[in-house]
Image: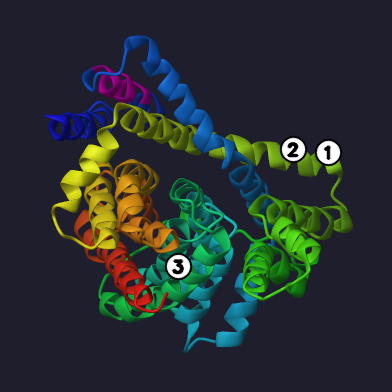
Amino acid sequence: MTIFIVVLCITLLVLLITWGKINSFLAFLIVSLVAGWLLGIPPDKIVHSIQQGIGDILGSLVTVICLGAMLGKLVAESGAAQVIARSLQKIFGEKYIQWAVMITGFIVGLPLFFDVSFVLMIPLVFSVVYQYKLPAVYIGIPMMAAISVTHGFLPPHPAPVALVSEFHGNMGITLLYGILIAIPTIVLAGPVFAASLKNIRAVPLQTFLPKYIPEDQMPGRFNSFIVSLLPVILLMLFTLLSFLDIPNSQVKAMLSFFGNPVVVMIISLLVATYTLGIRRGKTIKNITEDYGDSVKDIAMILLVIAGAGALKQVFVDSGVSNQVASGLNGLSINPLVLGWLVAAIIRVCIGSATIAGLTTASMIIPIMQQSHVNPNLMVLSVGAGSLMFSHVNDAGFWLFKEYFNITIKETFLSWSLMETIVSVMGLIGVLILQSFV
C-alpha cells in the first residue's frame, strides 16, 4: 500500500505540473501535504516536516547557487563570454569550428545557468552560420551538448549542488569525476552526432542575429578565461591538495576552509567584481544591481529545490523512504543504474531536469545508505538520468525549436536525441568510473 501511495503522489505531481499547469513549487507543497496525510503523519506534524525539509535543503545550497548566479551575470554582462567565443573561433578556424563552439559552450556554461547560457551563446552560433555558410543545427548541437552537460553534471549548477548536499558527497570530487565523464559525452553528443544532422535546413530568425559589445568595451582574453573558470580551478586545486598527506593540522584546516564551495565562490566573485567590474570603470552600484537581477532570475529555481526538499522530508518522516528502498533493493539492480532510471522516468514525465533529479534523491538516499554506493557517482548518475529524452513538456525543447526555426520532427531528431545520448553516455561513464574508484 505504501508503494502505491508514493506512486500516486508522484503521478499527482506530474499531473499538476504538466496537465494542470500549476507552478512547480506550489505543486510540490500540495503533493507534500497530500503525501503526509496519506502516509499517516499526524496532521500537526505535516507542516513541520515541510518546513524542516525546505530549511535543510536551502540552508546548504542558497549561498552557493546565488553566488554562482551573480558570477554568471557579471561574466555575461561584461562581455567576457563573447571574448572567450571569439578567441576560440580564431584558434580553431573554419575546419574545426564545431569544436570551438563546443568548448566555448562548456566554458561559458560552467558559471552560467542553462537558459542564460543558451541565450548568450545563440548569437555566436548564428554568426558562425552566416560567416561560414554552415547548417545551423550542425553548429548548434555541439554547443547545446556542452551547456546541457554542465547543467546536469557539474557544480555550481543548482541540481548537482543540491544532489551533492543530499547525498553527502564532495563537491570538488564530484566536479573532477563530472569533467572526466563530460569530455567524451560532449564529443559524442556534439560534433560526432551533429555530423548526421547536416541535412536539417534550419533558417534562424533574423531577430536572433548577433549583437556584439564594442571591442573597446570588452575585457581582456586572459582575464575572461580565468574569471570564468576560477571556481572550477579552485575547487579542483583544493580537492587535489586534500589527498596529500599533510601532517600539520592547521594547514589541513586552512585547506579545508579555502576549499569549501562557499568560500571558493566568494573568492571567485570578489575577483570578478574587481577585474570585470571596478577595474573596467563600472560602479559598485551598477554591479550590485546586476547581482540583484541575477538573484531574481534564479528565485523560482530555489523555490523548486525547496519544494523538492519538502516532499523528501515528508517521505523520510513517514518512514516510506526506507520501505521504498527495501522494495527497490529487491530488484537486484546496481544502485547507480537504479538512480539513473528513476530520474530518467521522472524527467520524461515532468520535463524538468532539476525536479527529476531532486525528486529521485528522496527515493534513492535510503538505498545509498544500505548499499554504501559512492555518493559522488550517484550525483552524476542521477544528473545524467535527469537529462533523458527532452520532449514537448520541456522548455528547452521549445527554446531550441523556436530559435533554430525548425519543425517538431526535426527537433526530436536533433535536440531530443542529443539529450538522450548525453544521458546514456553519462551513465556509461559513471559505471566505468565505478570500476576504478
The mark found on residue 289 in the picture is: 2
Q: Secondary structure at mark 1?
A: helix
Q: Residues within 10 Å of mark 1 (few under 14, many from 20)?
A: few
Answer yes or no: do the residues labelled 3 and 1 have beta carbons within 8 Å?
no
Q: Secondary structure at mark 3?
A: helix
Residue 391 showing in the rendered view:
yes
Q: Which residues are magenta?
A: 29-37
Q: Is residue 79 magenta?
A: no
The mark found on residue 285 in the picture is: 1
Q: Amino acid at mark 1?
A: Lys
State the residue at coordinates (29%, 21%). Answer: 36
Q: Nearer the viewer, residue 33 or 149?
A: 33
Answer yes or no: do the residues labelled 2 and 1 have beta carbons within 8 Å?
yes
Instruction: Give the image location of residue 355, x and y in percent.
Output: 36, 42
Query: What separation in Å lies between label 2 and label 1 (alpha carbons)?
Result: 6 Å
Furthest-top residue in view? 44
Residue 371 quadrant = bottom left
Q: Earlier in the sequence, mark 2 or mark 3?
A: 3
